[in-house]
Image: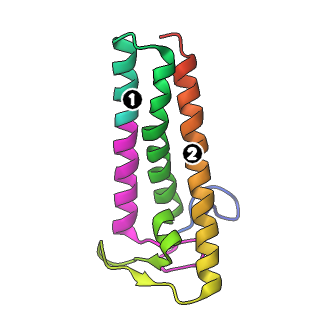
Amino acid sequence: MSTAAGAGPLNVVDYSPGVCNIGPAEIARRRLAGHVGLVVCVVGFVLLAATAAPHWTRLILFLPAAASASGYLQAWLHFCAGFGSRGVYNFGPLGKVQQVADRQARARDRARSLRIGVAAGLIGVAVAIVAVLLPV
C-alpha cells in the first residue's frame, strides 16, 4: 500500500485488513518468488530467441512474468494474495498462520487479493505481448 504521498509501501508491522497480512519472513519469501520468476522469464526469452522458435511461442512467458509480478507486488504491498483469499495472516515464522475472525476483514482481504491477481495477470500479458513483438 502506498503512503499518503504515494512514495512507497507502508511500514506496517501488524495485521491490517486489506492492507497488510504478512511480516518480514513472508515478505522475503514473496520477494524471492519474484526474483525466481524474473530469472525464469529472462532465461525463457533468451532460449526462445536463440533457438529461433516462432514468435507466438513467446506467449508462454506470460506464466513466469505473472508469477514474478505477483511475488514482487505481494512483497512490496506486504500482502499475500493467497493468505487473503484463505482468510489468514502471518507475522511470525514461516508456516505459522492465524485465522482472520472478522467477516468484513476477510472480505477486504479477498478484494485486495483479487486486485493483486488481476494486476499480476495484466503485467504477465503485457510482458508476453512485448516478447512476441520484439524482432529478436
- In x, y percent, where is residue 5? 70, 60
- In x, y percent, where is residue 121? 57, 45
Residue closer to the observer: 20 or 47: 47
Q: Which residue is mark 1?
A: 42
Q: Give the residue at x 34% y 59%.
A: 29
Image side of residue 48 versus residue 65, left or right: left
Q: Give the residue at x 63% y 55%.
A: 7
Tell me the quarter of the image containing the N terminus. Answer: bottom right
Q: Which residues are magenta?
A: 12-39
Disc 1 packing (10 Å; few <14; some 14–19; many ≥20): some
Instruction: Examine the image and state in which quarter residue 46 appears.
Output: top left
* Image disc number at residue 121: 2
Name which residue type carries label 2.
Gly
- In x, y percent, where is residue 69? 50, 46
Disc on the earlier residue, 1 or 2 = 1
- In x, y percent, where is residue 42? 39, 29
